[in-house]
Image (cartoon, helix red, strand yellow):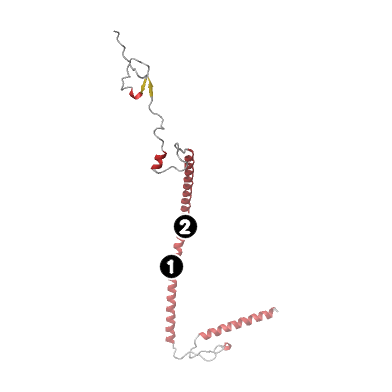
């Protein structure tokens, strides 16, 4: 069984090679001096070459093909050079990206800390405002009024303010002060009460 399998493989390989040779021979032109069957058992030439096709024309066609191929090679070299430049630029950018990412991370952390500090300050301010809230008598419960009319209406009256004039009680002296025994403090200098009263002379 192994010999049969090997023979079948060899036959298949030979047939594949023969078919490949036939395709190549179909594509290659034949020279005018060549004879009929020159391939042995592989077959005969199927497409004879026109006698008008001479050797200089074939050389010219080959030169044109070579020029076209050179142009393609030059274009491919330019594309390759551009690709290499772009690759190098991208590599430089990728090398610098970690540094930029570190800077962005540091900036984000600083902003986060500042935001936390601002929140703490705002919380302290709210707590202090709630503790040290001051309201005058008769003020409504709620936000403080902003209009002048509202402030004038709810402002304390002058009559309700405590007296700011202090009084000074003086000793009784009927000969000097026949009417009252005390005077206000602001009238002391006007009445000449800063010195002692003179004594009465005997008659």
Q: Quadrant of residue 51?
A: bottom left
Residue visible at 44% across and 71% down in the picture: 77
Q: Is residue 91 above or below residue 52?
A: above
Residue reaching furthest top? 203
Which numbered tag is attached to residue 103?
Answer: none
Q: Which label's residue is closer to the chain start, 1 or 2?
A: 1
Q: Residues within 10 Å of mark 1 (few under 14, many from 20)?
A: few
Q: Residue at x 57, y 84 (%)?
A: 19
Which residue is outermost to the right? Answer: 1
In the image shown, does 151 or 54 lie closer to the viewer?
Answer: 151
Q: Which dot, 1 or 2, sits closer to the camera?
A: 2
Label 2 secondary element: helix
The residue at 45%/69% (across/down) is 80
Give how far across and how far down residue 136 sits, in percent.
44, 37
Up-down: is 142 above or below 51?
A: above
Residue beneath disc 1: 82
Q: Residue furthest front?
A: 179
Q: Position of residue 60 (x, y in %)?
A: 42, 84
Q: Give residue 83's quadrant in the image.
A: bottom left
What label does residue 97 carry, if any? 2
Residue drawn at point x = 65 percent, y = 81 percent = 8
Q: Is residue 36 left or right of residue 195?
A: right
């Amino acid at each position: 069984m192994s010999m049969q399998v090997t023979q079948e493989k060899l036959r298949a390989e030979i047939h594949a090679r023969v078919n490949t040779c036939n395709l190549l021979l179909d594509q290659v032109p034949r020279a005018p001096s060549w004879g009929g069957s020159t391939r042995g058992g592989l077959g005969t030439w199927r497409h004879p070459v026109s006698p008008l096709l001479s050797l200089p024309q074939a050389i010219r066609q080959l030169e044109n093909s070579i020029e076209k191929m050179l142009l393609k090679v030059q274009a491919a070299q330019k594309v390759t050079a551009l690709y290499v430049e772009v690759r190098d630029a991208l590599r430089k950018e990728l090398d610098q990206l970690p540094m930029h990412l570190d800077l962005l991370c540091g900036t984000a952390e600083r902003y986060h800390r500042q935001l936390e500090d601002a929140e703490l300050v705002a919380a302290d301010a709210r707590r202090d405002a709630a503790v040290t809230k001051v309201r005058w008598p008769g003020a409504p419960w709620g936000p403080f009024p902003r209009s002048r009319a509202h402030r004038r209406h709810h402002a304390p009256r002058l009559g309700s303010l405590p007296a700011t004039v202090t009084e000074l009680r003086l000793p009784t002296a009927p000969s000097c002060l026949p009417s009252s025994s005390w005077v206000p403090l602001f009238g002391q200098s006007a009445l000449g009460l800063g010195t002692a009263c003179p004594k009465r002379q005997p008659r």
